[in-house]
Image: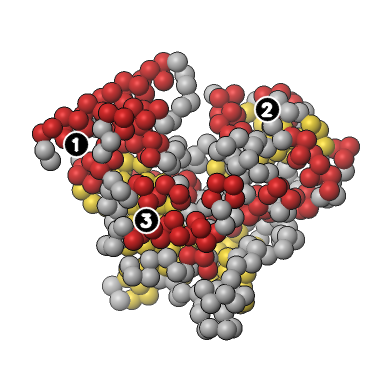
Amino acid sequence: MKTTEKIGFYNALFSAKIVNKGLHLIKSAGTSLPGVVALKISKNFLSFLSKYCKKNIITVTGTNGKTTTSGILAQLLKTDKNTVLHNEKGANMLSGIASSLAVNYKPFSRFDYAVLESDEAYLTKLYDYLKADYLLVTNLFRDQLDRYGELDTTAKKIQEAITKNPDLTLIVNADDPMLSELGKNNKRIFFGFEEITYKNSSKESLAPAESVSCSCKSDLSYEKRYYAHVGKYFCKSCGKSRPTPDYKAYAVIYDDYSEIYVKYQKNNTEVESCFKTGLVGLYNAYNALAAVSAALESGIEPKIIQTGLDNYKSVFGRAEKRTIKDRNVLIQLIKNPTGASEVLRTINHKTCDKLLIIINDNYADGRDVSWLWDADFEMLKDYSGEIVVSGIRAYDMAVRMKYAGFDKDKIIVKPNIKTAINYTIDSVEKNSHVLIMPTYTALLEMQKILK
């Protein structure tokens, strides 16, 4: 590394650290400003990740689950006594990733792994600055069509990034047909579920399955469909089928946890390990399987992985459990039809005493809220409690609940988010269970309110 480059890097680093301390002093929740400063001073700031990483740089992208997946993976690597640089707060554009490097990197040291969550559209820009060793792709669903366009557009953006990195190894969800064409010239490792068993009180989704076409333009068929377009698929026209997973799993989904049995090759012998995660729902079982597969691929032993899963703490708003005024509160981010429907599927109608849904339509949420009509809110029509709706589009959500068949007299509209939170919490007894479902910017506002 040239001396001038090193001076520029450390100048940017220390400047960003000063900005971060200033943000803490004024109690700001901003996560990207230090990175903005660092990139302004040194445009190649992110390229230094490759110079200081001793083992592997692992990037994580996809529509849903990338924050949780990368968070679990970082925890598993740390449990195996590795130093890990990770953008744990979910800021996944260039400035957010630069902020994590600036805030968490110890000057004049090296670290073992970098686990970097990246926005799908920004992955190709990130690869302009660093050479990743692995790319883990969780899934592709329709999300913020005003920003990303249709699924094939997002897939092309990810492929553009992969093309820049020919030595990249992909870790891919085998059950998502939208991912099957990615990185065909790269080494690919697949994970997926062979079978899902439900032992919980949640309802199966009644929403129409999300359809995608095969690369030959024919409709796909399914041996098993787990949700949306995810499952064990095949094409009757061209014979294409779901790749055989290198990490084959079987999941048992309970109300409060899941068990995941994983079969994989170790020293040319098939072995099976069982893992338990306290995160709820099938979608979180997928997140856990993705992280576990990457950890096993990195040589981490199953016992250490289970210890890491036991100690994992959810990122704010991602299946996060909190106690507020002696009430048990679960916060679940929603941002698109598939994600919202899967969260709705986890609701236990017997134990969920109150539900708060907060819908914003700021840029980071996506301006188009028509996705509310594609999410399966019909699952709530028999819910016996009140549903509180809040946020910029509170009245849109109230109308959606009415047309979902929910009793309009039990729909409480509180547009102000702080007012809605206080009403929801105060209107139930101590030790009651409350579920809060916010969109992204509503979640950020909640974070400030609940500090």
> Distance of mark 3 from mark 2, alpha carbons?
38 Å
> Do labels 2 and 1 touch, CB within 8 Å?
no
> Do labels 3 and 2 touch, CB within 8 Å?
no
Q: Secondary structure at mark 3?
A: helix
At 35% from the left and 32% from the top, the residue drawn is 35
**What number is the disc on residue 109?**
1
> Distance of mark 1 from mark 3, alpha carbons?
29 Å
- What amino acid is labelled 3 in the image? Ala
Labels 2 and 1: the sequence-earlier one: 1
| 189 with respect to 132 (left or right) | right
Labels 1 and 3: the sequence-earlier one: 1
Look at the image and tell me in which quarter the C terminus lies: top right
| 214 with respect to 308 (left or right) | right
Residue sitting nearer the eye, 214 or 188: 214
Residue 234, image x, y percentages: 56, 78
Q: How is the image coloured?
A: secondary structure
At 70% from the left and 25% from the top, the residue drawn is 416
Q: How many neighbours does mark 2 have within 10 angstroms: few (below 14), some (14-19), or many (20 or more)?
A: many
Residue sitting nearer the eye, 441 or 151: 151
Residue holding disc 2: 417
**Placement of 29 over or under 204, stated as above or below:** above
**In this view, which residue lies farthest toward the top?**
26
Q: Secondary structure at mark 2?
A: helix
- What amino acid is labelled 2 in the image? Ile
Q: Nearer the viewer, mark 2 or mark 1?
A: 2
At 45% from the left and 60% from the top, the residue drawn is 156
Residue 8 sits in quarter: top left
Residue holding disc 3: 161
> Distance of mark 2 from mark 1, alpha carbons?
43 Å
- What amino acid is labelled 1 in the image? Ser
